[in-house]
Image: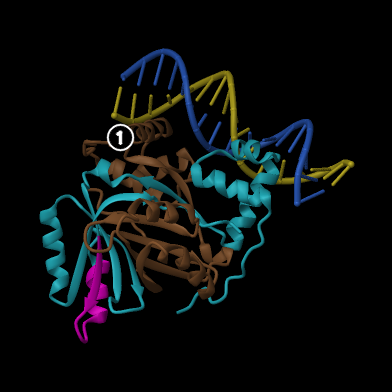
Chain colours: A cyan, B brown, C blue, D yellow
DNA sequence: AATGAAAGCTCTTAGAC
DNA sequence: GTCTAAGAGCTTTCATT
């Protein structure tokens, strides 16, 4: 079950950090462009990339998609407290509803904290109805995002 | 302030969706590889990419970095309720602490919901001390992530 | 561990359907 | 809106420092 029991903290030097920072900004930058940014030759840069991937520091590369451009007008964060005996079922329900774009299982009274993207407030009702059969929910609508997802210090 | 008042919902066809799905998996895939996946020529694929970027559907490309590989062993979600008159200051404090990797301002009693990556439980204490001068907090430690960040339906 | 030069491949532009 | 073809640019390999 625990596929990554004790991942060693990789030691990164300044160049690695610059490389990661550049990739955070634009993961499709060419190796030669990355090389220019970090001040190395392309082959060296390429090898550092490979090493960071092999170490697991780089887990992959992905696209930032703006849900608003796809018609998602509303974002909500839902705390979910399953009714007795419903924990696994609730987890399955959330997993199967694709509008839930993220869900963490946490300590404390609320078992799950999940994030939903929605086309409308009516859709929020529809989706939560599927959950409230098996759990108490507490919903907060996102008004703004003071800190959009970013990287922690690469210390 | 509202730089994107009413982003039109872009109409995507099957090929666009396949392209986005491929980029979600590997944003560094070459255009020719993407072309193979979606069944178009490289130039057509390249133009679709440009169009999706221009429409704002694609907001950029980024690297997935595994915080555990950097020694972050703990993740927490913190609900933050600023004390009277401290709202903006609390927002600034959170913004300035780089371990807060995400923060949303939400409706309801708790004004902010934020996510932190930590090296240790001691560090959680240190960081929250900076916030509790100006706000009440409620912290939930992440035990697992049933739904890792994913895309909503590209409908 | 990084560099530089060369071979091979990829991307993009241009022009046609 | 998509394709083929060709030039430009990039990535990688390998010998060298």
Q: Which residue is depicted at the point 11% across and 61% down?
A: A126
Q: How many marks?
A: 1
Q: Position of residue B76 (x, y in %)?
A: 42, 69
Q: Position of residue B37 (x, y in %)?
A: 39, 46
Find out whether residue B90 is within the magenta segment: no
In which quadrant of the rendered image does the C terminus of chain A lie?
A: bottom right
Left or right: where does residue A6 sit relative to residue B56? right
Q: Position of residue B32 (x, y in %)?
A: 46, 39
Left or right: where does residue D14 sit relative to residue A96? right
- Residue A152 seen from this side: yes
Stretch of the chain drawn in magenta: A77-95
In which quadrant of the rendered image does the N terminus of chain A lie?
A: bottom left
Q: Residues within 10 Å of mark 1 (few under 14, many from 20)?
A: few
Q: Position of residue A124 (x, y in %)?
A: 15, 58
- Residue A47 seen from this side: no
Pick whichever, B87 or A53, lies toward us: B87
Dot 1: chain letter: B
Secondary structure of the residue carrying tag 1 is loop
Q: Which residue is depicted at the point 18% across and 76% down?
A: A135
Which residue reaches farthest bottom? A85
Left or right: where does residue B52 sit relative to residue A72? right
Pick whichever, B7 or B121, lies toward us: B121
Pick whichever, B28 or D12, lies toward us: B28
Q: Quadrant of residue A32?
A: top right
Q: Which residue is depicted at the point 26% across and 56% down?
A: B106
Pick whichever, A11 or B78, lies toward us: B78
Q: Which residue is depicted at the point 41% across and 53% down?
A: A149
Left or right: where does residue B39 sit relative to residue B110? right
Above or below B105: residue A68? above
List the residue tagged with mark 1.
B3
């Amino acid at each position: 079950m625990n596929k990554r029991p004790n991942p060693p903290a990789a030691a990164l030097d300044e160049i690695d950090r610059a490389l990661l920072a550049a990739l955070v900004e634009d993961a499709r930058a060419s190796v030669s462009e990355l090389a220019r940014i970090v001040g190395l030759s392309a082959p060296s840069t390429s090898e550092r990339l490979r090493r960071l991937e092999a170490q697991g520091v780089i887990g992959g590369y992905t696209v930032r998609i703006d849900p608003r451009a796809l018609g998602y007008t509303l974002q909500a964060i839902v705390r979910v407290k399953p009714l007795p005996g419903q924990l696994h079922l609730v987890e399955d329900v959330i997993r199967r509803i694709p509008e839930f774009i993220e869900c963490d299982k946490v300590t404390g009274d609320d078992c799950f904290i999940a994030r939903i993207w929605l086309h409308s407030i009516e859709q929020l009702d529809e989706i939560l109805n599927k959950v409230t059969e098996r759990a108490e929910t507490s919903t907060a609508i996102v008004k703004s995002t003071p800190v959009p997802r970013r990287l922690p210090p690469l210390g």
